[in-house]
Structure formats: structure tokens, C-alpha cells
Amino acid sequence: MAAHHDLTGAGVTTRAATTLTSVTRSTAARNKTRRSDPSPSPVAATERPVPANKLTAAERHQVLTMLNCNRFVDQAPLEVYAQLLDEGTYLCSVSTMYRILRENTQVAERRRQARHPARVCPELVAAGPRQVYTWDITKLPGPVKGVYYDAYVMVDIYSRYIVGVHVQSRESGLLAVDFMTEIFAVHGIPNVVHADRGTSMTSKPVAALLADLEVTRSHSRPKVSNDNPYSESLFKTLKYGPAFPEHFGSIHHARQFMDSFVTWYNHEHRHSGIGLHTPADVHFGLAAQKADDRSAVLADARRTHPERFGTSDRGPKILDLPTEAWINKPITIDDTEPAADQTAA
């Protein structure tokens, strides 16, 4: 713009100046006028007149008092508006009610909400096999869409040993009782049985059985899957395995598959949460001897090729057998963070 003015000031025509600077003549003229004339003083802001339909301060106070009275304090303004109209009373529009509430920072949930008591976080520990069992039910896809089989699975949290599996056509508390009775007869009665809050887990038949056997019942908090980590981890190993089919042709097919899976899991699968031992070795007390055998093999390898090992004589931590298995281990003073559950399958 300054170049356009300089050119025209030097006697160049406005047409030529426009061609050279690409500034149109009208734009240059307006800019020149604006530069020559002083800017007009801003017009003083005029006070807006009060709308004729605005409620007075007393009327607004009356509306707020009505909305906060014991009768209407739990109701939405729309309901208050309708009820007052039915009684022949009109205070203001619904939008004005909301405006008044907003000015008084009361636009929120007006109903009294139920305050459910906080669920107790389950904290369970097992220092050996047959102390704490956890169980759950997972769905196995049937031959057609919408048909599923229910696999009842119970696992020992210390050894990760699957102590029992039943595949049924439905979920039932009575079937769960039969399932538990058979397991307890074979593997013994544990101190604690943990489960989530499914209908079978909280059913009266299951509660009565555990009470008669003096077994402590433990349940996960609602909608907290981490409270049952061992069962959830087991189900992931089951369903993400390469052998898991897209569907089962029959309930007999599902039972055969689960039997073969349990055999592999208990006797062949090296579990990362128990020092890469098989659950059967830990459950039946064979892991300690195998840990000594592994240490001897590593010692021979260290003597043969010391350059391939570190300076510490200690073996890999992944081979350590935990002394305890926790569900929600509490934080102690010495802990900087809660210990992670050794549930990886």
C-alpha cells in the first residue's frame, strides 16, 4: 500500500501504480482517506434498556424459593412448571427457571441420588496349594449362532492348577453345587472360594454348600474384572490359543476339547507366574526338586562358558517360584507401588 502511495505521489498514474503494486485504485483511495482523516472517537457505549418482560428481583427470588422448597427440590424445572400450571399458577417460563438456577450455580442433578456403600476390596493370599480356589463360567460357542455351552472352571490360585472343569448346557446354581462337590471330594476343601457376582456364584445353593463346609466365600466388586484375575487369565489362554475352534459341533465336542486343554495346561504348560513350572508340579510339590535340577544345569553351563553369564550367581528371576499368590495385595509402607498379580498365562 505504501508503494502505491509513493508512486502516485511521484506523478505515476493510479492505473500504472495499480498494475505495478497489484493494489486496486478503490482500496488505495480508501486507505489514503483513512490516513488523512483522524479516526473518529469511539461512540460511548449506551446502556441497554431493561427488557419489559424481565422479572424483578423479588419475582426471581420467589421462583428460586419455589424451586428449592421441599416439594420441588428433587424435581426438574419442567416438572415443576407443569405442576404449577395444573394448580393455576404461572411464575415464569422453563428457560427462565433454568436461567435463575444457572445464576445461582444450581444447574445440576436435582434428584437425591442413592449412595450405595463402597464394596470391600477382596484381599486374598495363598501360601500353598488347596488354600484359595477361584472359579468362573465362560461361554463356549455352539454349532449355530446364539447357542452356547457353559464351561465351569475352578483353579487353585497358588499353583494355577485347574482342579475341575464341567461343561453344561446352561448356567445353574444346582449345577455349580455338583461341580464344587466333586472337586472338593478329589482335591480337598479349601479355606476360601472366590468368584465374581454372577447368578450362579451368588446363588443360595452355592452359599449353603460353602457354609456347611465352613468355607469362606469371597466375591469380586461389581464391574471389577481385576478382582478375579486368575480365572480371567486362564480364559484368555484358553480362547486365544491356536487350537480353540470357532464353534463346537456339540456339547460332547466341547467337553472333549476342555479335557484335552486341561491336560495340556496342568501337565505341559510352563506358566510364567510360577517360575515356568507346570501347574501340576507346583500343586503336587514337585517344583522345588525341579528348580534344584534347573540350577544344576545352569551351574554346569556357567562353568563351561562363564563369559556368557553375568557376575551374579543368581539365576534368572523368571525361574523364581513365588512364595505367595495374592488377589489385590495391599500396599505396605515399604512398597512404592502395589505388587502386580502374577497371573500371566
Image (cartoon, rainbow, N blue to C red):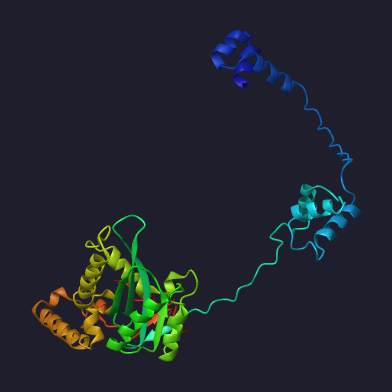
Residue closest to the eye, 61 or 337: 61
Q: Position of residue 63 (x, y in %)?
A: 85, 55
How many discs mark residues in the rendered view?
A: 0
* Residue appearing at x 87%, y 42% in the figure: 53
Q: Quadrant of the C terminus?
A: bottom left
Q: Position of residue 284 (x, y in %)?
A: 23, 87
Q: Quadrant of residue 24?
A: top right
**Res. 330 in view:** no
Q: Residue at x 78, y 57 (%)?
A: 104
Instruction: Please say whether residue 229 is visible from this viewpoint.
Output: yes
* 11 or 4: nearer the viewer: 4
Q: Is residue 76 above or below residue 17?
A: below
Residue at the left extreme of this rendering: 304
Q: Position of residue 140 (x, y in %)?
A: 32, 64
Task: Write the residue at 65% across / 70% down.
Answer: 114
Above or below, 24 against 250 in this view is: above
- Horizontal side of 282 relative to 220 (left or right) equals left
Q: Is residue 229 above or below residue 324?
A: above
Residue 171, given in percent of the width and then of the height, sits at: 39, 70
Against 8, residue 115 (above or below) is below
Residue at 40% over, 78% down: 174
Q: In this orientation, which residue lies closer to the viewer: 182 or 32?
A: 182
Corner quadrant of residue 234: bottom left
